[in-house]
Image: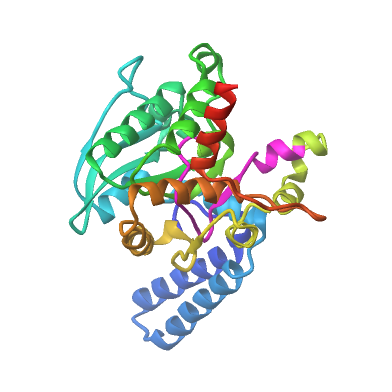
Amino acid sequence: MSAQFSLPFESPIAALEDKLQELEAFSQEQDIDVSHEIKNMKQKIEQTRRDIYENLSAWQKVQVARHPDRPYTLDYIKAMTTDFIEIHGDRIHRDDRAIIGGFAKIDGQKVMIIGSQKGRDTKSNVETNFGCAHPEGYRKALRLMKLADKFGVPIISLIDTKGAYAGLESEERHIAEAIAVNLREAFNIKVPIICVIIGEGGSGGALGIGIGNRILIMEHAYYSVISPEGCAAILWKDRAYSDKAAEALKITGKHLLKLGLADEIIPEPLGGAHVNHAAAAENVKAALQKHLAELLKMSPEAIMQDRYNKFRAMGEFEGEVEHRIPTLDSIETAGKETAAS
């Protein structure tokens, strides 16, 4: 847990850590051996943290996903890759720092990494627009995806955004069109795409870089069509109901896995990824290597079909509904027949 910032539900842990510091200070000042008591206190802190983090509510997981000390895309790139070469700009407007990306290697395997980026302080938050990308951010991401496709390099997408920027500038430069084009074009990429929700996975802002063969989610991350606050404001007309909205939205890894929207939950260090960036990155790296090994055995056509089938199969229905997933070939054939008629 961060020494500078603790979440509301972590108050029992913070209280015990304060007592531990007092005990250690007393031992040094009075030159008295209280090592046994210190050991017991550390064990109590660890057990309290375990009890809390193994029983988090959906709203508490949202709070963990937003922790200011949580590792961001550049932290993961630094911890689990080598030879990272960042690529800037969309070649149309500017370089949006809310989405960063470039070529890198994961234990010798060449990859293209694209990800949302937030800031740690006022200056970096302004630079990254708090992780909310403008249209040029998504156009840069598409440029990088097509570059990876050209050179046959698998794509890793790290998602951590509450959503795309919804301001005037975004509307002027067609944010909806930029995201929609990314959705369409991602299905035509012939290399594997693995998406990892490392923090917040909010709305179309996440989906704009979230079309993949595999959707992985960190243990305390969330993935949702709308933020709990936004949902509460619409349904209850009051953001105070955000905790109820978070439960109703089914946004945690456990729910997403059950609904078939996520393929794997990546475990986090005890207390969340913010307590140990290196351990969190190792877990992400191991999951990526496992899925890359499976996907790289597939042909380009099989990779595209796999991605298409995955998203066509999403959704649960009640009653007798014929569940038939059309193939890309059948769609192309139908299109030709329609054009001919």
Q: Nearer the viewer, residue 334 or 3?
A: 334
Q: Residue at x 31, y 56 (%)?
A: 296
Q: Nearer the viewer, residue 318 or 223?
A: 318
Q: Residue at x 52, y 35 (%)?
A: 333
Tell me if 253 is positioned left or right of 75 in this view: right
Would you identify the image quadrant in which residue 236 lies?
top right
Q: Position of residue 20 (x, y in %)?
A: 47, 72
Q: Is residue 130 visible?
A: no
Q: Is residue 52 above or below residue 221?
A: below
Q: Residue at x 52, y 21 (%)?
A: 177
Q: Position of residue 27 (x, y in %)?
A: 38, 78
Q: How many marks?
A: 0
Would you identify the image quadrant in which residue 202 lies?
top right
Q: Farthest front residue?
A: 341
Q: Position of residue 56 (x, y in %)?
A: 63, 63
Q: Is residue 232 above or below residue 273?
A: above
Tell me if 322 is positioned left or right of 214 in this view: right
Way the structure is coloured? rainbow
Can residue 239 be found in the magenta stretch?
no
Q: Is residue 70 visible?
A: yes
Can residue 211 be found in the magenta stretch?
yes
Q: Farthest top residue?
A: 172
Which quadrant is the C terminus positioned in? top right
Region in magenta: 208-232
Q: Position of residue 206 (x, y in %)?
A: 51, 39
